[in-house]
Image (tube, rainbow, N blue to C red):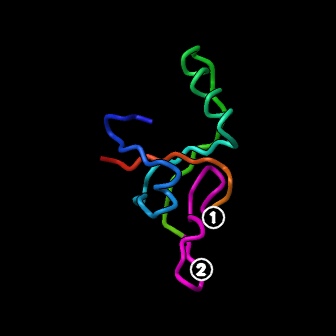
Amino acid sequence: MLGYIQELISWSDIKEGKLKTGALIQIWRNEETIESARESLDNKLHPSGHAIIFISYLYNENNNRIGMIIRDHNGVFPILFDDELKVGGNWK
């Protein structure tokens, strides 16, 4: 993420509703993948993961946040909160 133009948003903050429309999100399967990505950046290798753009939160009938509407290279669609780790960045 480009820290000087983005505010880093943690996975717990994402689930609490702190993302803004247009925020960039990176998805990793687990903590080991994040560490591998960090090491890859140091070694100038290509880290794994998937980048998406946040559109809005998804709510259930009880008005609880259960996921997000996102955009990626495949289009716009909903994703539910799950065990995949996500880190986001709101534009400053």
Q: Earlier in the sequence, mark 2 or mark 1?
A: 2
Amino acid type shown at disc 2:
Asn
User: Is there CB contact under 8 Å for labels 2 and 1?
Assistant: no
Q: Main secondary structure of the magenta part?
A: strand
> From the viewer's perspective, is 23 left or right of 78?
left
**Residue at the (65%, 42%) spot, across then down:** 28
Tell me which segment is drawn in magenta: 58-76
Q: Where is the N terminus found, in terms of image quarters?
A: top left
- Image x and y of residue 80, in percent: 65, 64
Q: Quadrant of residue 2?
A: top left
Q: Amino acid at mark 1?
A: Phe
Comparing labels 2 and 1, the label whose residue is closer to the camera? 2
Pointer 2 residue: 60
* Residue that label 1 marks: 77
Compare residues 73 and 80 and report the one nearer the observer: 80
Residue at screen point 49% across, 56% down: 14
